[in-house]
Amino acid sequence: MAGPTLLDIKGVQTFYGNIRALNGVDVTVNEGEIVALIGANGAGKSTLMMTIFGAPRARAGTITFAGTDITQMPTHEIARMRIAQSPEGRRIFPRMTVMENLQMGASLDNLKHYDEDVEKVFTLFPRLKERIAQRGGTLSGGEQQMLSIGRALMARPKLLLLDEPSLGLAPLIVKQIFDAIRELNRTQGLTVFLVEQNAFGALKLATRAYVMVNGNVTMSGTGKELLANPEVRAAYLEGGHH
Ligand SMILES: Nc1ncnc2c1ncn2[C@@H]1O[C@H](COP(=O)(O)OP(=O)(O)OP(=O)(O)O)[C@@H](O)[C@H]1O
Ligand SMILES: [Mg+2]
């Protein structure tokens, strides 16, 4: 069940030099929702995720999180607002073990419930427990994605941002990752905002979704509505399993 607005993005414009990558984006994420952002390569999806963290910084518009304007807040302070991310490409620490990677995700405030939080990650992804002492860089792609999400969860986020969690993974692993996201949302009420190229999977998972084209949000609706929308089907679901 969706609660009050947690993340409110209004009229956000982001530039790389003189090139405008986001042209005034409006997106809201309510407490308890899974919201998906779909769109083609280069649409600006990752840019929006990164703009939430202030790198790159929005040049126009506002980003409000839990009632606080975070548009100009330093990135480390934004993280302290309990927003955590699994960025595009996962970015785990390759030379560190699974356990050390998880430790990196825990903020100082959370050290007192560190053991409990690690156990929660291992319950969600038992595969990680079996590989506790293995170096991040030697994990499979799917295991690295699990670790990236697990590390983000160690921050006890109120909002979890996921950039392409399914990228490059086999269907069975994608299912495990999506099931885990659904489980986190259902059992812990975790709010999730995810970017996906896998439009079919994302729209099935999402409470609501947005479509981005060339730095603009062009459509939004419930996951079901967008799955049934002919334009969405033609542009993003053709050739997929549906
Ligand atoms: N660091 C950068 N410097 C200059 N231009 C950039 C930079 N990062 C991204 N862009 C440009 O901004 C636009 C949006 O890129 P972005 O990575 O946000 O797209 P995306 O929707 O995440 O694509 P993909 O699905 O391929 O990950 C693209 O045209 C891209 O070339
Ligand atoms: Mg991207």
Image: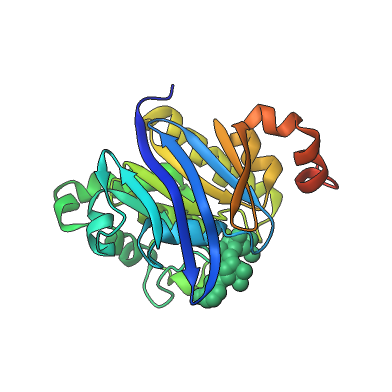
Q: In the image shown, does 37 or 104 lie closer to the viewer? A: 37
Residue 146 image position (x, y, % from top left): 48, 54
Q: Is residue 130 visible?
A: no
**Tally of numbered discs:** 0
Residue 124 image position (x, y, % from top left): 44, 42
The residue at 59%/57% (across/down) is 215
Q: In the image shown, does 236 or 123 lie closer to the viewer? A: 236
Q: Quadrant of ligand 1?
A: bottom right
On the picture, is 116 further left or further right than 6? left
Q: Is residue 118 visible?
A: yes
Residue 209 image position (x, y, % from top left): 58, 38
The residue at 49%/64% (across/down) is 90
The residue at 38%/67% (across/down) is 55
In the depicted structure, whether residue 167 falls above or below residue 116: below
Q: Quadrant of the C terminus?
A: top right
Q: How is the image coloured?
A: rainbow
Residue 154 image position (x, y, % from top left): 30, 51
In the picture as drawn, the residue positioned furthest to the right comes out as 239
On the picture, is 212 further left or further right than 115? right
Q: Quadrant of the N terminus?
A: top left
On the picture, is 157 further left or further right than 1? left
The residue at 72%/33% (across/down) is 227
